[in-house]
Amino acid sequence: MYVNPDIKKTVRVFPEEGRRAYLRYDMNENSEGLPLDFVEAVKREITPEFLATYPEPSAFTQKYADYMGMKPEQVLATNGSDMAIRYLFETFGEKGKDVVTVAPSFEMYWVNCNILGYHHVPVPYEPDMTMKVENILAAIGEDTRIVVLLNPNNPMGNVYTREEAEAVVQRARDVGALVIIDEAYHYFYEKSFLDLVKKYDNVAVLRTFSKLFSIAACRLGVVIGSEAIIRYTKNAKLTFDVNSIALLFGERLLEHPEIEKTLIAQEQEGKDYILSELKARGYEVRDCKGNYIFIKTRRDPHALAEELAQEKHVLVKTYGKGMLRDIMRVSVGSRAAMERFLEAFLPLDIAEEK
């Protein structure tokens, strides 16, 4: 039986399941979720007739466009931002040609390169975890079809200045390449490059409802770009890829901006608290600009993570290799969520006696 050789050679590691019984600080979710009364109110709209009808995304895209100050023709709803990545790659990539990203970064970028037979060009970080934009610019050449900037970047947490972002966009435009600006964590960082969509015809911005908006289970992402970018990307889109429940929750969230403000304030309070507490105890920590931080643990982070899971039912993120091998990444939530984390973490992270 024939198997696509690009797919056959791709090695995937999928997230572990069975996480619901744990305190989850490993995948940058909001472990506490949306307000219960809001969720219950939306659930009451899900009738048998609602479930029997195919999804109609136009109401959501119109509301989202109004919310962002765009035209509805500049917005495309997708089944999570990971599907948005696939659509953009299929539409603007070319087999055997280059996709430039920083490294490390969100794994679905290199995974899609492998699956689609694209040449991934990873631009490494400096030893001090900074990124030199001149290295990104140098990596963009005549064979480049797509350039990816995550702002902030997961996992590193770095951000770009406007001058840096525009330099990349202009360099990519010179060679006819699309620039994807992934803003999955933009609500946790006040600066956005959304306005570049109006200034340049080779920019697509990605947003997600999985992080701040706390509906990762529903799978809802958004592509924002020029009318031409959205039209071409829509041609690659499955007819009914975004389910009606995701669209309904998305609409109702847009109608309640006070929820957004509350969630941002809660996350910032929680981040300020945990950074302050850890620094006071002598820990080396890094504010990664999104809803996550790095902790330089006193013990081996992998052994510590295993103990946290087994003994405390707490999940955190560690890395098997590279410059993050000795780092623990912890998702940030409310102050109460951070207090629960520290109650589990601090007693286990005991420095060895000298």
Image (tube, rainbow, N blue to C red):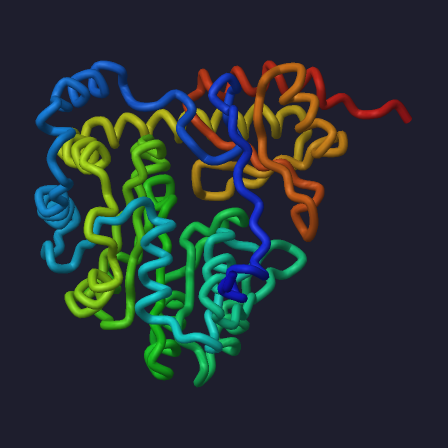
Q: Which quadrant: the C terminus?
A: top right
- Vertical comparison of 353 with 232: above or below: above
Q: Quadrant of residue 344?
A: top right
Residue 322: x %, y % from top left: 69, 52
Q: Is residue 80 above or below residue 250?
A: below
Left or right, residue 187 beside residue 66: right
User: Would you say 209 lies left or right of 3 here?
Assistant: left
Q: Which residue is at the far front?
A: 1
Q: Position of residue 304 (x, y in %)?
A: 71, 27
**Residue shown at the point (59%, 61%) measured from the top left:** 9
Q: Residue at x 44, y 36 (%)?
A: 291
Percent position of residue 212, x then y: 33, 34
| Residue for point 54% across, 30% down | 275
Position of residue 260 measured from the top left corner of the image (x, y, whole percent): 25, 32
71 vs 36, left or right, is: left
Outermost right residue: 354
Residue situated in front as seen by the camera: 158 or 82: 82
